[in-house]
Image (tube, rainbow, N blue to C red):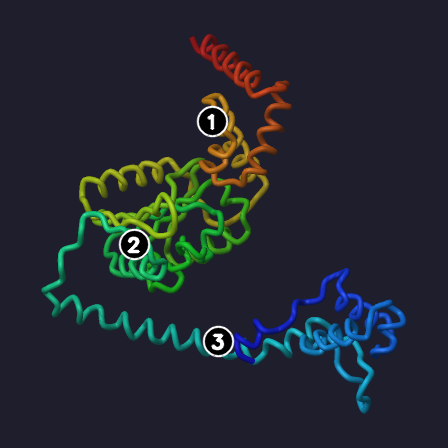
């Protein structure tokens, strides 16, 4: 079955639909046929026939052996295996072919560097909006790294591939040397199972990972020679080669790295409590500075709903009913601590 064949399939039956009702009836009965569906479900023959046809195409019904009109229900797992087995094999073959092509292309890099002297000068700032071109540039930059790869990224799907810009997944297939890689993540990464698994793999390959309460946003610096930042609006990225700007970005990233906490991907309750306390302290500081919820959430790389829930809990702990009152209480607490220190 081709991908186009899969996309042409009917929707998987949901509760309240004719197909869902027919499938439920089939599960509860020895068999179903057109007349039983009409009689027991109160639907028309046209609706029953369409529902049965959809379920047959999805392999969720099949004919009773030796019969041409009665159907029995099929386990959804078995149905999905029947539908997708051929496509899964085709995808695996395609992935193998792509990996082989990538390795063959990368094997030409030494020849390219040794013999091509006419490469044009790179612009100081290069804006790339096409997602495919952006990923290609990221791959080239990291594969050719010689000394270090410094990378700060958020945990909102950091290892996935969003439609606008691959925010980290290209590292999996780029052939990047993990021993050159230092990744800085927000503290909230310690609560994400997917990120913890990826961190364990990266460290096993020789990389390093640390977490900070509010690290720099998505930022890549390679060999202190080139930096990459995402576009402010829309898809794409900007590649920066102006050395003074790259030096400033690297200084920002290394400063955050030096103050960050090592992270090996493990999880324990003491570490979780410590991390949660650090996040709460950061929220309190930002509240005191009058920042909005969405700004706080973005800086801490947590969802807006989680941020608002934490703020509500903190306000309850302070005995404050409004943000203004919470700010006043925090301000008074800060002044009190200053007087004690004096």
Residue 175: x and y in percent read: 33, 64
The disc at residue 128 is 2
Residue topped by disc 3 = 92
Mark 2 → mark 1, Cα distance in angstroms: 32 Å
Residue 169 lies in quadrant = bottom left
- Would residue 252 be found to the left or right of residue 36 on screen? left
Q: Are marks 2 and 3 in contact (CB under 8 Å)?
A: no
- The residue at 43%/73% (across/down) is 95
Q: Nearer the viewer, mark 2 or mark 1?
A: 2
Q: Considering depth in this image, is 176 or 314 the residue closer to the camera?
A: 314
Residue topped by disc 1 = 291
- The residue at 59%/73% (across/down) is 8
- Residue 37 lies, with reference to residue 230, above or below; the image says below
Q: Considering depth in this image, is 104 or 323 the residue closer to the camera?
A: 323
- Residue 51 lies, with reference to residue 151, above or below; the image says below
Residue 127: x and y in percent read: 27, 51
Could you say whether the residue bearing mark 3 is in a helix, strand or loop?
Answer: helix
Q: Nearer the viewer, mark 3 or mark 1?
A: 1
Residue 5: x and y in percent read: 56, 77
- The residue at 23%/43% (across/down) is 246
**Between disc 3 and disc 1, whose residue precedes?**
3
Could you say whether the residue bearing mark 2 is in a helix, strand or loop?
Answer: strand
Q: Nearer the viewer, mark 2 or mark 3?
A: 2
- The residue at 32%/40% (across/down) is 253
Neighbor class of circle 1 (other Cα within 10 Å; few <14, some 14-19, many 20+) is few
- Residue 149 lies, with reference to residue 217, above or below; the image says below
């Amino acid at each position: 079955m081709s991908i186009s064949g899969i996309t042409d399939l009917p929707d998987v039956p949901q509760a309240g639909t004719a197909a869902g009702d027919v499938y439920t009836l089939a599960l509860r009965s020895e068999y179903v046929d057109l007349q039983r569906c009409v009689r027991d479900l109160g639907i028309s023959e046209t609706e029953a026939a369409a529902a049965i046809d959809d379920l047959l195409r999805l392999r969720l019904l099949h004919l009773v052996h030796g019969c041409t009109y009665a159907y029995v229900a099929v386990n959804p797992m078995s149905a999905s295996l029947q539908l997708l087995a051929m496509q899964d094999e085709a995808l695996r073959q395609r992935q193998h072919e792509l990996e082989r092509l990538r390795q063959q292309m990368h094997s030409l890099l030494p020849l390219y560097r040794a013999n091509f002297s006419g490469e044009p000068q790179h612009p100081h700032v290069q804006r790339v909006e096409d997602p495919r071109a952006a990923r290609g540039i990221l791959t080239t930059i990291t594969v050719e790294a010689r000394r270090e790869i410094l990378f700060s990224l958020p945990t909102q799907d950091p290892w996935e591939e969003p439609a606008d810009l691959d925010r980290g997944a290209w590292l999996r297939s780029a052939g990047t040397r993990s021993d050159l890689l230092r990744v800085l993540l927000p503290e909230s990464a310690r609560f994400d199972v997917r990120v913890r698994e990826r961190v364990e793999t990266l460290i096993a390959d020789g990389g390093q990972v640390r977490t900070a309460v509010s690290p720099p946003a998505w930022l890549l610096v390679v060999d202190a020679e080139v930096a990459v930042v995402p576009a402010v609006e829309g898809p794409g990225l900007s590649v920066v080669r102006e050395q003074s700007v790259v030096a400033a970005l690297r200084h920002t990233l290394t400063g955050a790295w030096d103050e960050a906490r090592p992270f090996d991907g493990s999880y324990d309750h003491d570490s979780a409590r410590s991390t949660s306390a650090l996040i709460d302290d950061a929220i309190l500081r930002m509240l005191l500075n009058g920042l909005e919820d969405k700004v706080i959430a973005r800086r801490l790389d947590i969802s807006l709903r989680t941020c608002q829930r934490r703020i509500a809990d903190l306000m309850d702990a302070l005995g404050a009913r409004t943000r203004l009152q919470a700010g006043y209480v925090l301000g008074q607490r800060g002044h009190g601590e200053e007087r004690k220190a004096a």
